[in-house]
Image (spheres, rainbow, N blue to C red):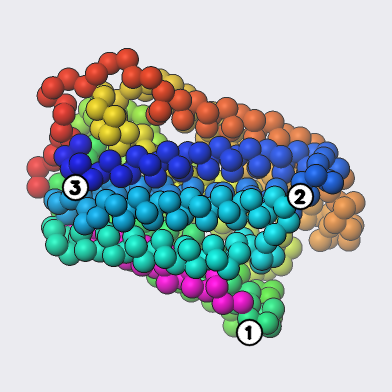
């Protein structure tokens, strides 16, 4: 590592991986309920399992983003983080809030607002976390070198903090509630998180390919422009059936159809830069995760999102297993994989070793990816059957669920493959180091500016 304060990222990556395991474990339990409906019905009802699964996902991804920022910003700004102590305090607040929220869920204490079930004190704790982070990273950037990567990263992080405030406000009118509820849910994952993802990807591309920074930054600005242009008004595809004005149907259909563009641009960008760079970087696993991230995001968020985003299709598909298929592949492809990419890249430097356990790490890539893809395909087919039985033929929800049990068992099997892949990844990152870093690899290679 070039800067001592980059070591702050280690605790964030460790915390993220711990919550990753928790999230997947509760996902397996929830998937089991689909296959065996009365499983844990009295001990841990499905709504609690789902809460921990979805909340765990969001928090570990945020931890990964924070860790990525604390790792890459010192190198981009060419100076130490303003206050490593504040970064550790931020981590402690976030971890305590996450554990407090999960503990409350397990005993039935929650806010009841889907995906935003956290108690009020946890939500204000997240506000404190965001303020500490923005101060720490913002002052680091302002006092050092400013680059397109840090500018886009900061814009994304500010967006995360601003739109989170809508999680605290809970309007009494349910239509208004859903209108602003999507400001958090959509504008995070289909707006500002894309900026964070793009900035981390650009950093990795520069480090691993050696392509000129100017070229990468031009691509970065183009991707960000596409993401904001399509994502902001693309929120309208969530307004179709919640009591919002009818004009959101054509607006939502048009702009959300364009949301595939920034993800396609990321695929072209990443593969073009790797081809142009022709640099044999030793961390092949990090390269694999980086390239895989763009492909996964394109298919999960782009293609599978487009499949049911037009309002005349969404009329039949919303709230079915097709939505679940899209959500699983989109989150994994876009955000889980970029976090796993930066962790794979950074951990050898933080542990003072050569890129290690490369084969095991790449096996984890293929197990995780194939598991999620198989899960997505089975849920898609199950969703199509569900749409026909429930929305066309008029079966009740539970009658339709009984007819697609086979797909739920297949999804459960895929879930076990994903869990094994995650354990392999964690072992490859935090497991024993057999080869120490040679003296000539004590600092990260820097591309020509």
- Residue 39 at x, y percent in the picture: 82, 40
Image: magenta residue range: 147-170
Estimate the spatial distance between the alpha carbons at disc 3 and disc 2, rounded to whole Å: 44 Å
- Residue 94 at x, y percent in the picture: 46, 54
According to the picture, the residue beneath numbered tag 1 turns out to be 245
Query: Considering only order in the chain, which callout, 2 or 3, is on the residue closer to the N terminus?
Result: 2
Residue that appears at 46% across and 29% down: 425
What is the residue that sits farthest to the left in this orientation? 449
Residue that appears at 45% across and 56% down: 93
- Residue 245 at x, y percent in the picture: 63, 84
According to the picture, the residue beneath numbered tag 2 turns out to be 46
Please give the label number shown on residue 204. Answer: none
214 on left or right of 373 = left
Q: Identify the secondary structure beneath mark 2.
A: helix
Query: Considering only order in the chain, which callout, 2 or 1, is on the residue closer to the N terminus?
Result: 2
Q: In front of the other: label 1 or label 2?
A: 2
Q: Nearer the viewer, residue 447 or 99?
A: 99
Query: Considering only order in the chain, which callout, 3 or 1, is on the residue closer to the N terminus?
Result: 3
What secondary structure characterizes most of the magenta part? helix
> In the image, is residue 168 part of the stretch drawn in magenta?
yes
According to the picture, the residue beneath numbered tag 3 turns out to be 75
Placement of 6 over or under 189, stated as above or below: above
What is the residue that sits farthest to the top in this orientation? 434
């Amino acid at each position: 590592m070039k800067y001592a304060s980059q070591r702050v990222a280690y605790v964030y990556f460790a915390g993220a991986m711990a919550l990753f395991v928790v999230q997947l474990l509760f996902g397996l339990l929830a998937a089991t309920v689909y296959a065996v409906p009365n499983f844990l019905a009295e001990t841990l009802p499905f709504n609690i399992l789902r809460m921990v699964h979805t909340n765990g996902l969001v928090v570990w991804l945020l931890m990964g983003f924070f860790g990525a920022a604390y790792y890459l910003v010192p190198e981009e700004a060419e100076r130490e983080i303003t206050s490593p102590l504040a970064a550790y305090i931020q981590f402690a607040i976030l971890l305590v809030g996450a554990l407090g929220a999960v503990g409350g869920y397990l005993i039935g204490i929650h806010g009841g607002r889907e995906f935003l079930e956290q108690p009020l004190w946890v939500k204000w704790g997240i506000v404190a976390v965001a303020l500490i982070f923005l101060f720490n990273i913002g002052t680091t950037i302002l006092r050092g070198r400013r680059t397109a990567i840090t500018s886009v990263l900061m814009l994304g992080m500010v967006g995360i903090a601003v739109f989170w405030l809508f999680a605290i406000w809970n309007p009494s009118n349910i239509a208004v509630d859903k209108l602003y509820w999507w400001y958090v849910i959509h504008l995070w994952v289909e707006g500002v998180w894309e900026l964070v993802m793009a900035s981390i990807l650009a950093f990795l591309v520069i480090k691993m390919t050696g392509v000129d920074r100017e070229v990468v930054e031009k691509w970065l600005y183009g991707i960000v422009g596409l993401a904001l242009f399509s994502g902001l008004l693309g929120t309208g595809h969530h307004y179709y059936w919640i009591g919002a004005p009818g004009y959101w149907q054509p607006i939502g259909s048009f702009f959300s159809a364009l949301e595939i563009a920034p993800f396609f641009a990321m695929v072209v960008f990443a593969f073009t830069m790797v081809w142009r760079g022709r640099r044999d970087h030793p961390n092949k696993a990090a390269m694999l995760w980086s390239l895989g991230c763009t492909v996964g995001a394109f298919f999960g968020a782009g293609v599978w999102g487009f499949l049911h985003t037009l309002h005349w299709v969404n009329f039949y598909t919303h709230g079915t297993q097709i939505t679940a298929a899209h959500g699983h592949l989109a989150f994994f492809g876009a955000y889980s994989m970029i976090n796993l990419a930066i962790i794979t890249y950074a951990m050898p430097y933080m542990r003072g070793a050569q890129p290690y356990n490369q084969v095991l790490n790449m096996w984890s890539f293929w197990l995780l990816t194939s598991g999620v893809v198989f899960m997505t395909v089975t849920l898609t087919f199950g969703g199509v059957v569900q749409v026909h039985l429930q929305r066309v033929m008029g079966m009740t929800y539970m009658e339709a669920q009984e007819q697609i049990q086979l797909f739920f068992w297949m999804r459960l099997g895929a879930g076990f493959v994903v869990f094994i892949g995650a354990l392999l990844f964690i072992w490859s990152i935090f497991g024993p180091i057999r080869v120490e870093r040679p003296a000539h690899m004590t600092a990260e290679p820097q591309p020509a500016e």
